[in-house]
Each structure stands twice: as structure tokens, then as C-alpha cells.
Image (cartoon, rainbow, N blue to C red):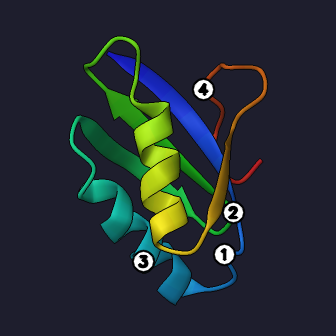
Amino acid sequence: MSEFTLHIDGMHCGACVRRVSQALSQTEGLTVKEVRVGAARLESEQQPAPVDQAIAALAKAGYIAHPDPSGAPVSVGQ
């Protein structure tokens, strides 16, 4: 299993959190661990993790996402 964090631009409220959660949960190969305003922590059994697919799903939902630059999982909301 690999875990990664995406930083997400354009999230401002609980409705955004629900919309992001829904978009990510429909992305094959991902398990949504946590979503908060501004970030999502995800897990995948695939190697390499489908980071690009998650970013594309969020773009389709109207958000811009960036992987954590360190590549390491971090706590959401830091």
C-alpha cells in the first residue's frame, strides 16, 4: 500500500469537501483516507499510486490539485 497527500486549491467549505470526496471515491484504485478543506490523504494498492488519475478526477470536478512536494504522506490540515 502506498499513501499520498494532495493539496487542493479552491476548496472553501463543507460542500467542497463532499464534492472532492465523491470525485476521489469514484477513482479506481484509490481509497480516500481523509478529506479536509485544502487537502486529501489517499491510499492505493497500485504501484505506482495513481496520483495523475486523482489529479485528473479533481480537475474534472473543478479543483486544482498538487501532490505533496516531499512525496511523503503528511497529516491533512498541516
Q: Earlier in the sequence, mark 4 or mark 2?
A: 2
Apparent side of residue 19 relative to residue 44 in the rendered image (left or right):
right
Q: CA distance from mark 1 to mark 4?
A: 20 Å
Q: Do the residues bearing badges 1 and 3 touch, measured as CB atoms within 8 Å?
A: no
Up the image or down, 73 lies above or below 20; here it is above
Estimate how packed mark 2 is, as few (under 14), some (14 to 19) or many (20 or more) residues with alpha carbons within 10 Å: some
- Which of the marked residues, 1 or 3, is nearer the chain's N terminus? 1
Residue at which label 1 appears: 11
Q: Secondary structure at mark 2?
A: loop
Q: Please identify, in this view, whether the residue under mark 1 or under mark 4 is nearer the observer.
A: 1
Disc 4/disc 2 C-alpha distance (Å): 15 Å
Q: Position of residue 67 (x, y in %)?
A: 66, 36
Disc 3 residue type (three-letter):
Arg
Q: Earlier in the sequence, mark 1 or mark 4?
A: 1
- Which residue bears the numbered disc 3? 19
Q: Which callout, 3 or 4, points at the residue further toward the start of the chain?
A: 3
47, above or below 77, in the image: above
Provide the residue designation for mark 2.
38
Q: Which residue is mark 4?
A: 73
